[in-house]
């Protein structure tokens, strides 16, 4: 059985999916056909229900809930890993400033809404282009994610605030960034098998740290191995292997913050069982 699999080209995704896609583990008769796209493209594909399995922002899950169940493994969720609001040192930002965001459905945009509700002038920009948009003064500031957390300083930008840190300080929980979903219409036995295989793929990545490096470099916008390793260390952690109760509690609170009504009912029907 062949299943389509949506993931980003970022090192944390290619790191954990390498063994699954390239059959470095026994995939038990399943074959995974990868579709690489940036996170906002993945969000839009998930909302349309185009892929069997896919990465998406947790903030987009309310819009693709009818299509997908969350898997326990594969999530990007943690501390000190949230989006950063950055600008040029000479720029003063205010309520009239135009802010670049990596997509309307991204967690980055949701956090900007939560903590800077008066910043309403936004421009959707591919995440990897946001730094240059700021440097070329096409926008006043931007919310950066992924590898750009490690490169903005050397490009002459400065941090205005760490949106993930604001989340952690206000809630006491890790920040849910992105999760992995599987189509609800897929048979439950296959859903469970995929969940188990993804966990094995993550474990393989942990136990064979350098085995995926060529696969990672094939798709990453950043080829510096130090940056790649920093990226993996930041976004791949114990929650990637299994959300656990603390991770699920953080997600439940996140759903409450985004305005989900009856979030307990919503939450209880969100996961593969």
Image: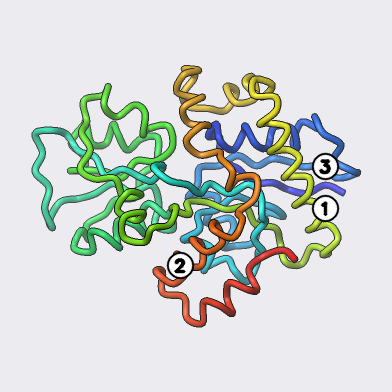
> For the C terminus, which image quadrant?
bottom right
Q: Position of residue 110 (x, y in %)?
A: 37, 59
User: In this rendering, is residue 38 above or below 109?
Assistant: above
| Mark 1 or 3, nearer chain start | 3
What is the distance, in whole Å, between disc 1 and disc 2 at their CAs?
Answer: 28 Å
Tag in front: 1 or 2: 2
Q: Residue at x 27, y 22 (%)?
A: 154
Left or right of 10 in this view: 185: right
What is the distance, in whole Å, between disc 2 and disc 3 at their CAs?
Answer: 35 Å
What is the number of the mark on residue 253? Answer: 2
Q: Secondary structure at mark 1?
A: helix
Label 3 Cα crowd, 10 Å radius (few <14 / some 14-19 / many 20+): some
Q: Residue at x 56, y 40 (%)?
A: 237
Quarter occupied by residue 184: bottom right
What is the distance, in whole Å, between disc 1 and disc 3 at their CAs?
Answer: 12 Å
What is the number of the mark on residue 250? Answer: none
Q: Which residue is mark 3?
A: 31
| Mark 2 or 3, nearer chain start | 3
Q: Which residue is mark 1?
A: 193
Is the residue under label 2 in contact with that under label 1 (CB below 8 Å)? no
């Amino acid at each position: 059985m062949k299943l389509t699999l949506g993931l980003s080209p970022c090192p944390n995704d290619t790191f954990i999916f390498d063994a699954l896609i390239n059959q470095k583990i026994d995939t038990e008769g399943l074959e995974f056909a990868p579709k690489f796209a940036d996170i906002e493209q993945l969000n839009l594909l998930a909302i349309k229900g185009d892929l069997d399995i896919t990465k998406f922002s947790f903030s987009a899950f309310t819009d693709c809930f009818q299509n997908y169940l969350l898997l326990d493994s594969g999530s990007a969720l943690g501390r000190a890993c949230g989006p950063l609001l950055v600008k040029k040192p000479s720029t003063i930002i205010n309520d009239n400033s135009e802010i670049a965001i990596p997509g309307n459905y991204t967690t980055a945009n949701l956090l900007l809404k939560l903590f800077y509700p008066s910043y309403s002038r936004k421009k959707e920009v591919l995440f990897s282009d946001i730094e240059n948009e700021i440097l070329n003064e096409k926008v006043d500031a931007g919310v950066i994610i992924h590898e750009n957390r490690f490169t903005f300083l050397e490009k002459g930008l400065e941090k205005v605030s760490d949106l993930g840190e604001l989340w952690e300080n206000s809630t006491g929980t890790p920040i849910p960034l992105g999760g992995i979903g599987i189509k609800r219409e897929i048979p439950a036995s296959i859903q469970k098998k995929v969940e188990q295989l993804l966990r094995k793929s993550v474990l393989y990545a942990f136990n064979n740290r350098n085995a995926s490096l060529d696969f990672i470099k094939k798709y990453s916008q950043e080829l510096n191995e130090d940056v790649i390793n920093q990226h993996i260390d930041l976004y791949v952690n114990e929650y990637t292997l299994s959300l656990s109760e603390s991770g699920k509690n953080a997600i439940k609170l996140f759903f409450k913050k985004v305005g989900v009504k009856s979030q307990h009912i919503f939450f209880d029907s969100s996961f593969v069982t």
